[in-house]
Amino acid sequence: MPSLYRFVDSLEAAAAHLEGHFRLASFAHFRDIEDEQRKDSEEGRASYQIEEGGHVQVANDTHPTQAIYILSATACETQAGFGDWRIEIKDPEGLRRKIAAALPATARVFLEDVRYGKSPILKAKLDAQGRIDRVWFQKPDKYKAEQEWRFVAVFAPDLKIENRVLELELGDCSDVLGLPKWIKEASHVQNP
């Protein structure tokens, strides 16, 4: 698997990643985030209509599914507006295993790329796997440039967690992460 990347606003935040401090967030967190570039009002929702007219609601806030948290990454080495520091995830599968090891044994962690083109109208009703994909790994085309990948932590259905952000301590992550790189250096050089 190729490297993935995360972007953060400060060297301190980048160093925290290397030390194993990670924050996974709920879909509700990303729906309500103040940053307009990252905000997706349909995040974690998957209502759709079948062409024949019936409306099907797969997941929403009034009928919540189990606790699900995501950590986003990208296949892009640059990502305007997402932070001045880039962290390379040189071993994405290794990071997925570290996240899984920090959670209860009943939790599952998935790593997949996001599929774009989440249409509100479908030709046929989705099966169970199709509904999961639509909620966890699909976004509208307008986000396609992000080339997002997601680490998705899914807890057992009977475990109710109210937090919108889940803070994890993974221990030293220097084996799966590269050193942080300041990616805005060229924009700070003054022309003579």
Image (cartoon, rainbow, N blue to C red):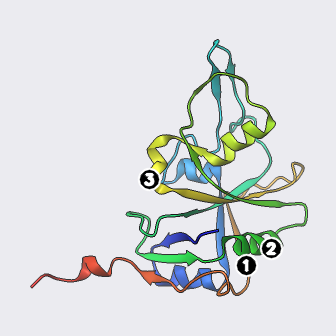
Residue under numbered circle 1: 169
- The picture quadrant where one finds residue 22 is bottom right
Asked whether the beta carbons under mark 2 and mark 1 sit within 8 Å of each other, the answer is: yes
| Left or right of 153 in this view: 36 | left
Query: What's the amino acid at mark 1?
Result: Glu
Residue at the limit of the structure toward the left, as seen here: 192
Q: Is residue 94 left or right of residue 123?
A: right
Give the mark nearest the N terminus, 2 or 1. 2
Residue of label 2: 102
- Amino acid at circle 2: Ala
Q: Residue 144 placed where, x, y %?
A: 47, 49
Q: Is residue 180 left or right of residue 60?
A: left
Residue at image point 68% right, 36% down: 60
Q: Which mark is residue 178?
A: none
Give, as a three-letter code, the residue at label 3: Ala
Residue under circle 3? Answer: 145
Determine whether the residue tagged by mark 2 lies in a helix, strand or loop: loop
Earlier in the chain: of badge 3 and badge 1, it is 3
Image quadrant of residue 129?
top right
Cα separation between marks 2 and 3: 31 Å
